[in-house]
Image (spheres, helix red, strand yellow):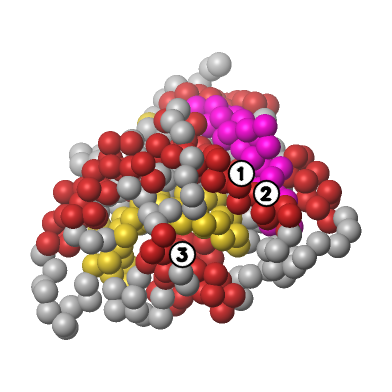
Amino acid sequence: MNELNFASDNVMGASAPVIEALVAANAGALPAYGGDEITARLTKRFAALFECELDVVLVATGTAANALALATALSPWGLCLCHSESHVIDDECGAPEFFSHGAKLVGLPGVGGKIEAPAVAAAVDRLPRHEKQMPAECVSISQATESGLVYRLDEIAGISEVARARGLWFHMDGARFANALVRLGCSPAEMTWRRGVDILSFGGTKNGCLAAEAILVFAPELRKTLRQRRKRSGHTLSKGRLLSAQFEGYLEADHWLANARHANAMADRLARGLGALPGVRPAWPTEANEVFAILPRALDERLRRAGASYHPWSDLSLAAGEAVGPEEVLVRLVTSFATEETSVDALLAAARTESGATA
């Protein structure tokens, strides 16, 4: 494996406790389609973890989780407000619109991938109230955002207040839920339903699962059709216990939180090292497990020749007054539960060598 691979947290496989739980669940015969004892235990575990009654619907991909969650909250003629560079609008090939049978996603601007409550309010309030206009029905945020920022609890509550006042459902895309949670140091309940979130895409795949995502429904009114939507879309696994087992291993003994803390710590280490190099500056603060840096173009080219893997990134969400120069490039580097300090230090050593800096 490439030691300098920081392309994504999806490049790593599953963690040992997840694999062990999956192997254990593989033995013997159990009822199909989620009727097994493992899935029953998992539903109770999620209810205890989030301190509330909820519905748990499992799928294998984040796209399925987001698309089905939004389709549940939207009519075919409804609008969902989200950031213009959010994953649901920019990276899912129209799946939310497809599974909602025609609903639209409307992108709003915001620094670092965040939307703000006043912008949501203004966008909804300026919509014409006419049958020719699709009405706003939902707002969706990414926690953490596509620029690696984390919504604070008051920010989530502010968006929720706007949504409630205008009759909108509130969805959270939590592909990196654990990374945001440990950064804030709060409970899952405090970051979701206690701040007004109605439905959550709870990610596991990026943080140690093999392929497991959960749609957690807090609002009773949204529980009516989700399972039928999952089946109709082809995302109901007959051997559902193999999704549930991954989450059992993932959640056991707070393994998921330990994974996220490690990934965040590796991102912090990488951000500090890059920030000490001449000509390198952060595009946004490092708040989860992603580092966004503006590099001299020459350094970027030499790092890639040294074998480093990472992605260029959009500059549309930069703060006012910040810009990427003609001889610079904005890049994203991602750490994971399996990233080792030696890999971070190896990339920093290569960067120091290529930039002419000394340790």
N-term mark: 2 or 3: 2
User: In the image shown, does 304 or 141 lie closer to the viewer?
Assistant: 141
Measure the alpha-carbon separation of dots 1 and 2: 6 Å
Start-end of magenta stretch: 242-268
Q: Is residue 59 left or right of residue 70?
A: right
Residue identified by numbered label 2: 41
Quadrant holding the N terminus? top right
Of residue 357 and residue 262, the one placed in the foreground of this image is: 262
Tell me which secondary structure the magenta stretch mostly adopts: helix
Residue appearing at x 44%, y 30% in the figure: 186
**How far is disc 2 from disc 3 in space, using C-alphas?**
19 Å
Q: Position of residue 346 (x, y in %)?
A: 64, 29
Q: Which of marks 1 and 3 is nearer the N terminus?
A: 1
Q: What element carries label 2?
A: helix
**Residue receiving disc 1:** 45
Residue 243 at what x, y percent from top left?
A: 69, 57
Task: Give the percent coordinates (x, y) of residue 288.
Answer: 47, 36
Residue beneath the point at 36% across and 41% down: 194
Q: Nearer the viewer, residue 193 or 111?
A: 193
Q: Residue 223 carries which label?
A: 3
Three-letter code for the amino acid on which mark 2 is drawn: Arg
| SS of the residue under disc 1 | helix
Give the residue displayed 56% in from the left and 30% down from the top: 261
